[in-house]
Image (tube, rainbow, N blue to C red):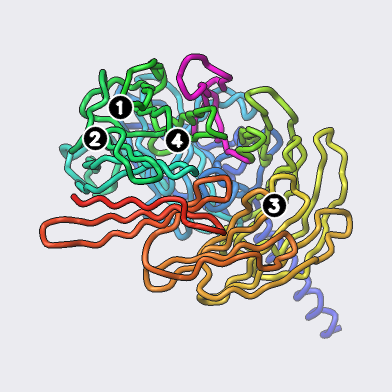
Amino acid sequence: MKKNTILIAVVIVLVMATSAYSAAPANDMFANRIIISGSSGTTNGNNSDATLEPGEPFHVYSSLFNNRGYGSNSVWWTWTAPSTATYDFDTRGTSSNVFVCVYTGDSITNLTKIVYNYRYVPLHATNGTTYHIAVTGADVTSTGQVVLNYYEEQTSPWITEMADTNSGLLEIATPNGSLASFHLKFIFSAETRTNQFGDMVEMRYDIEFYTQTGITVTDKKGNIIVNNVTPPGAGIQYIPIAFDGKILTIYDQLGNRLISYKVKNGLVLLNEQPLTIDGFFEPILRSGSEISIFLYQLGFPPNEAVTGAVAFDIKLNNEKWSFPMQPGFIHLHSSKKQMISRETEGTYNLNIHFFKKGNSLAKHNVGLPPRGRIEYCSDGKGGFLYWTSKYISPDYINSPLSYITKKGETIFDNKILTDSGVTWEHADDSMKNFVTVVRSGASATLRSYKVNKKMEKIGEVNVSNYRDSKFIGKELFVEQRLSGQEGFTIYNSKLKKKWTESIAPGHLEYLGNGVFMRKVITPGAGETNYHFKIFNKKKTIAEHDFTY
């Protein structure tokens, strides 16, 4: 009888402990959110055993912004603004890493995200508007006591956070050996405002480029074609973005426009194209015949990116194709095939839309893994090979690979590789071959696989002083660095060595068509010397020297 009593007592204790552990917080569900009020206050809670509910929004854009976790343990509050002002919601005193997300709307499936950030958010609130605040763990282990403080924000004046000025020679070289160069002054400044607790709530920054000399163009023999000429029609803030030896295109920062020139005994103005979108841009010259401008607009904090693209012929006569500005990130996958993708995220899904010259090729939707994100390579046709990588460590692919065609057909699913600790991955333009890189200190082991159902290994090589690698067509370019000096080795798809450029002083750049350039900078007495060597596997194509 005594033994049975003890056993029953133990069972009761275990059941009570299990029930206590598995009990969801009172404000786990949106419908049960806790009401808070007034212009300031503090409320407490706990997100241990908090869950997602059907239709709950995707709180954090993790795979796009590398944040940690996907908001699987959220708790809710609701608050109505007593006045039009900026209020801070912070989580000082919370026992784990959390994100704060603020929404408007009347149901869990009809919410509009207003702002989110790590640990706190500044909310520009409107009098009488009701806001819903979700506090969610940065990952599945970020659980425990939650403290939510709210108060009307008191901000400091704008304070210069960073100011940096650099100058140097900026150059664009062509595979045939021509070089366009000029001296540039680069000014970056950032200002911030903080609240009364020292948390940064606003930031504004500015990037300016000022030309200190005109543009000089030399041919492959070193003959000067254009000598220190200011481009006609350009302002004082411009940078060259494309040059094919005959046509030079610049970006005029003050006018927010592209301007093209014919290079022949001077710079002859050809055309200009205004850019109607302000923001970050990344100009890419493709195949010597198109200029593609990738446009980015980011909020602060980055609620989401809005991106677009536009492509012109190199003379800026015609717009070749364009992308409208839409949420998501765009990435260049193949310059040869002029293929890019746009990535957006939904509720625990990554949506990938492939385009060629702006035309839709294929759409794919894959589930986002806990505490990880999707990485992938494209086959150039709209199909893709993908795997997951973990945020908590470098981009390891200790996870299965899957390959889906343009039409959504699965070639293979959850294919396991024997590699471990892979920190970078590559596929060639045709995606017939896939290379993994396993870092070990300054060295790396590269393994090549055939992209098919078996994913059989076809090559392996060890590289010392490893820095980076990428496919150039069907060849793998492996860059090496030692004490500020650079070299490289070219391998075929089976990782058989084809040719080597020895490690030497200077910075290396790939120009296209199998041509590279080494840039060597040597400071002198009150001057700086620049030497450019343009070469391929067989010979030196051109050499250029400048002194400033």
Nearer the observer: mark 4 or 2; the answer is 2
Residue 117 place in picture, x, y as percent:
43, 43
Nearer the observer: mark 1 or 3; the answer is 1
The residue at the far bottom in this view is 2
Nearer the observer: mark 4 or 3; the answer is 3
User: Residue 282, labelled with which disc?
Assistant: 4
- Name the residue at 21% across, 42% down: 185
Residue 198 place in picture, x, y as percent:
24, 49
Secondary structure of the magenta portion, mostly?
Answer: strand
Contact, mark 4 vs mark 1 (Cβ under 8 Å):
no
Q: What element carries label 1?
A: loop
Give the amino acid type for the residue marked by disc 3 in the picture.
Answer: Lys
How dense is the environment of label 2, judged by Cα within 10 Å: few (below 14), some, or many (20 and up)?
some
In this figure, which residue is indicated by the disc labeled 2?
A: 227
Q: Residue 419 vs residue 254: left or right?
A: right
How dense is the environment of label 4, judged by Cα within 10 Å: few (below 14), some, or many (20 and up)?
few
Nearer the observer: mark 4 or 1; the answer is 1
- Name the residue at 33% across, 22% down: 256
Q: Label 3 vs label 2: CA separation? A: 39 Å
Vertical arrangement, residue 482 with respect to residue 425, above or below:
below
Vertical arrangement, residue 42 with respect to residue 338, above or below:
below
Quadrant in the picture for residue 321: top right
Contact, mark 4 vs mark 3 (Cβ under 8 Å):
no
Give the extent of the magenta segment.
305-333
- Name the residue at 67% across, 73% down: 461
User: Residue 265, labelled with which disc?
Assistant: 1
Q: Label 1 vs label 2: CA separation? A: 9 Å
